[in-house]
Amino acid sequence: MQFTNKTAIITGAGKGIGKAAAQALAKQGVRLGLLARSASDLEALQHELKQNYGVDVFYAAADVSKPEEVKPASAQLIEQLGVVDILINNAGIATFGTVLDMDPAEWERIIQVNLMGTYYVTRAVLPAMLERKQGDIINVASTAGERGFATGSAYCASKFAVMGLTEALFHEVRKSNIRVTALTPSTVNTELAAKAGLPIGEEDRMMQPEDVAQLIVSALMLPPRVVMKTAGILTTNPQ
């Protein structure tokens, strides 16, 4: 892909992988629409990216699990960007506990954000991609979407579902020249992982958000005639 004049919407853009992806794409000259719950995080990132890379950056604050917020926020970003070439569904949350210990409301909240958020934003952006018969959709899943683990029922269920959604969408839209990719990183050294109590380890040994962002850029740089359907990335030697 040639990144000149390309546009992208990134969810969960205020922190972690989303922020790193925004920085990596801005460096390539991509015009950005940033979506997350915290307007202050997005405003700070907008200022940083404009100052460092001179690209157009717009943002809208919304909870991706709420369609009544996703719809106007997505419409605003699409209007500001003109077209959307790339959608990166990255927004996600994680807490852990056994099936019996975790509050059912929290279990459902994880499904709503990680799965339904991906669905709602995709549904808002996809029609214009289909009309233009081009686009890239990258869903940030997890190794937890490939294998389960104790205390991870909600998170694993959400990420397995994202993998299923991605697989189905891949087959729906590939004839329209739209590439759909699922990324499955293992634990990434982010604020989300730290708050969830995951072993993020030392910075020089554990996967960083910038590593995942580099994989995102690499997937997008492939010639349009091919697609990276699924890509895993793991820490080489975790602690």
Image (cartoon, helix red, strand yellow):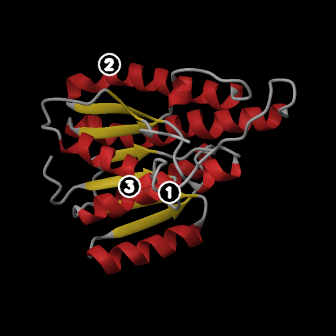
Q: Amino acid at mark 2?
A: His
- Sequence-first disc among 2 and 1: 2
- The residue at 32%/19% (across/down) is 171
Q: Is residue 44 above or below residue 81?
A: below
- Sequence-first disc among 1 and 3: 3
Q: Position of residue 11 (x, y in %)?
A: 48, 51
Quarter location, residue 169: top left
Spatial CA span between label 2 and label 3 = 25 Å
Task: Residue at the far bottom: name it.
Answer: 51
On screen, residue 129 versus residue 94, left or right, reads: left
> Label 2 belongs to which residue?
171
Q: Position of residue 121 (x, y in %)?
A: 48, 43
Spatial CA span between label 2 and label 1 = 38 Å
Residue 203 disc label: 1
Q: Is residue 55 above or below residue 30?
A: below
- Sequence-first disc among 2 and 3: 3
